[in-house]
Amino acid sequence: MFSDRSRVAAGLAVVCAAAGTGAVMYALGVLPEPWTRGYISEGGVATSPRDGIYRAGIVALAASLALLGTALRRLVPFVFAILATAGVFGTASAAVSCTPGCPLPPYEPSTPADLVHAGASVLGVGLAVVAMTAVALISLQPVLRRTARMFAAVTLPLAVLLVFGLLAIGRGLFTSVLERVALVPVVLWIAVTGLQLLRRPAAERA
């Protein structure tokens, strides 16, 4: 069963993913080296001239997770719960910004706000990857399963490398570029899956 309400949620997930990505990229554009230096979260620090736009973009991306979960709810309820929780953590990361530079342990002294923001961000993205992997493994619609497997095959190695970089190297060119690259397949999975749900035949939505 796939209701029209689920179809609307899928469409809104695509819109929010696109709008959120655009807003975050626009906010990062004012940073000295937006694509090769610093963490993405630096676009939302209070000293950034576009911090409000950045936060709005993160909220939109968080909403896209919850909306995709809503669209998948009839097909696989527990993935809905995972994506809804990911959306909550994403919203929390937008509500609590890090300090300039977004310092993270073990290489830099961090404030409680830095830790809360980083923790919420990691949990939000991590749960999205868990949901993606779950869709890739369970018996869903074949097209959704194939799509999730394709994106999971790209995302999981990047996520492992990013965790290694954060723990073993810290802030630098490697982690900055890898963070941006690792998030691309996650957002694309949301958008592509939403579009696939929109294209399901009307008979399957009855």
Image (spheres, grey):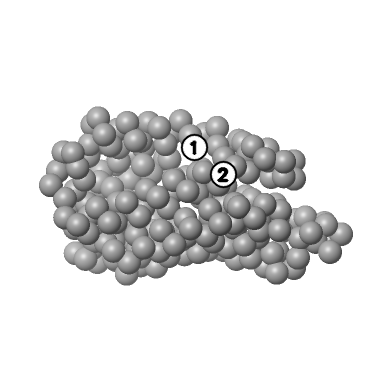
CB contact under 8 Å: marks 2 and 1: yes
Q: Give whichever of 49, 121 is nearer the camera.
A: 121
Instruction: Give x and y (percent) for residue 202.
Output: 83, 61
Mark 2: few, some, or many residues within 10 Å (few <14, many ≥20)? many
Q: Relative to 72, is 8 above or below?
A: below
Residue, x 22% and y 36% (percent of image)? 170
In this rendering, position of residue 36 left or right of residue 22:
left
Q: Earlier in the sequence, mark 2 or mark 1?
A: 2
| Amino acid on which the number 2 mark rests in the picture | Met
In this rendering, position of residue 91 left or right of residue 147:
left
Which quarter of the rendered picture does the C terminus lie within? bottom right
User: Which is more foreground, mark 2 or mark 1?
Assistant: 2
Residue identified by numbered label 2: 132
Residue, x 53% and y 55% (percent of image)? 83
| Amino acid on which the number 1 mark rests in the picture | Thr
Q: Give whichever of 36, 11 is nearer the camera.
A: 11
Instruction: Give x and y (percent) for residue 147.
Output: 65, 41
Mark 1: few, some, or many residues within 10 Å (few <14, many ≥20)? many
Residue, x 63% and y 39% (percent of image)? 136
Residue 68, image quadrant = bottom right
Cα distance in 3D space between marks 2 and 1? 9 Å
In this rendering, position of residue 73 left or right of residue 96:
right
Q: Give whichever of 129, 58 is nearer the camera.
A: 129
Would you say residue 174 is visible in this rendering?
A: no
Which quarter of the rendered picture does the N terminus lie within? bottom right
Q: Secondary structure at mark 1?
A: helix
Residue identified by numbered label 1: 155
Q: Secondary structure at mark 2?
A: helix
Q: Relative to 153, is 17 above or below?
A: below
In this rendering, position of residue 107 left or right of residue 54:
left
